[in-house]
Every structure is written in structure tokens, then in C-alpha cells.
Image (cartoon, grey):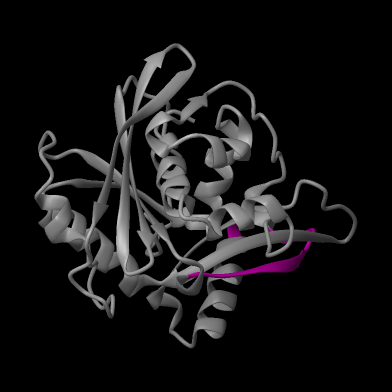
Amino acid sequence: MPFWTRFWQLVARRSVRQAWGLACDGSDWALVGLSKYKVAGVRVLAVEKLTSTDPDRGRSGFDVGLSQLAVRSRQRVSVGLTEDEVIAGVLELPAQLPRDDWAAEVQLEASQLLGLTPEEVNFDFQPDPLSFGLFTRVHWVGCDQARIRAIREGVRNAGWRLDSVEPALHAAHRAASHLKGGLDSLLTQSPQDWQFDLGPNLGHGQPVFGLKEGADWGLHQALKSTAGARLVASGLALKAWL
């Protein structure tokens, strides 16, 4: 195993019936549970608001609230990282550079921008499928590894298991891509009534690593709405089936 840890691991499709996502909602947290109800359909099982016990977010801030929920013990949950916890960028690497060397290049770039040592950062990356010629464009994201440790510890202290961690924008993109009725559903339905289709994306097909402010105006506006955190939490939970 490499000494660095990816933000999230590809989750193999498995026969789960329920999945949970946890996203920051201002000074609090939004927890959404999803349930599979047919071959390619998912609906909302529960929506909870957890009061943060750590406004400065030096620790997880959600462990107490998460531990008090009446759900089956050792449930799995995915957690989102807010925009101010994540940095992102694009590297242009020589086309002849072996893929095995990309991680070291990304790790060094992330550590320099975060002002941390390479061993203190978590990161992930994805090549741009449209790259060609002498260079390969690699989209990457990174954060302080200490934040990942705090999240992992908070989930463990609450008696749950951490499934994955990823930027909130990526999770919101996933939810918007599979939300029945599209983003208009945020205005016409309560989160408790949302349904998701696990079939081909209904839109927003742009690779998530390339998403930037202004790239998808509707999605960014949705994140600023009162339903934004629940959209992120839904996208985090959806990864259990996608």
C-alpha cells in the first residue's frame, strides 16, 4: 500500500439496501439516508440535522449527534469536505511520464500549495480524457490529512464506519445527475420526497474533477440554497450504488 491515502476509493457495486451521507450545513450537519426500492431506483429514507459540538471544527463536530441516532450500529457513512477544506488544480505532465509517477507529482503540488509536507496531504487525481499531444492534463484535489483523520475518528467514536470522503461539489454533481426531475425538484419537493435513478446520468455529464466555480451555474446555485447540504449528503450516499 502507498503511504498516501486517496480521498475516496472506488466502491464496488454491492447489494446494500441503505446508504448514508453526511455533509456540513453551515455550523451544523445534514445526514441523509437513502434506500434502494427497485432495480434502478433509490429514495430518501431519512433526513436528519445534527448540531455541531465543535464550531471551530478542530475535531469532527458531528460525532455526538451521529452516535445518538436510532439506526443499526456500525452503519456505514460517507462524509463531504467543504470548499474551504479542499484545494484543486490541473497539472500538465509530459505525455511520456509513466502513470505510476503521476501520484508523486500531484502529491508534491498539493503539499506546496497547502504549505504542508507531502506526507501530510491527502489527494486524488484523474486524467483529462481530452488530453493529447506532448502533455497529459491531470485534474487533482487535495486536503490536509489531519482533517481526514478527524473525520475518521469522529465516525468511529459515533459507532459508525467511514465509507468514503470526497469534496462536497463532487457529491452534489452526482446527486444532481441522478435526481428525478433534475435540480427543479429542489424547488418543488421536500428532500424527504426526492428520488434518484441509478441509470445513465440525466444530465451534468461533465467530469467532476473539472468542475469549477461558474462551470455549472445551476449546481452552484443549488448548493447555496437551503437544500444544498442535503443534496451533497444524498450524493455521498448514492456512491454506494454507482
Give the magenta-colored segment's residue range: 86-101
> Considering depth in this image, is 17 or 100 the residue closer to the camera?
17
> Considering depth in this image, is 187 or 96 the residue closer to the camera?
187
Residue 133 appears at what percent x and percent y?
A: 90, 56
Considering the image in quadrants, where does the N terminus appear? bottom left
Q: Is 70 situated left or right of 128 in this image?
A: left
What residue appears at the point 50 percent right and 82 percent down from the top-left corner? 114
Extreme residue in the front direction: 188
Q: Is 65 situated left or right of 190 in this image?
A: left
What residue appears at the point 43 percent right and 50 percent down from the top-left corner? 8
Q: Is residue 99 visible?
A: no
Q: In this view, does 85 lie above or below 207?
A: below
Q: Is 184 situated left or right of 151 in this image?
A: right
> Considering depth in this image, is 140 or 23 the residue closer to the camera?
23
Q: Is 197 situated left or right of 57 in this image?
A: right
Q: In this view, does 124 lie above or below 87?
A: above
Extreme residue in the right direction: 133
What residue appears at the point 16 percent right and 59 percent down from the top-left corner? 63
Residue 65 appears at what percent x and percent y?
A: 15, 56
Whether residue 100 appears in magenta in the rendering, the answer is yes
Q: Is residue 124 visible?
A: yes
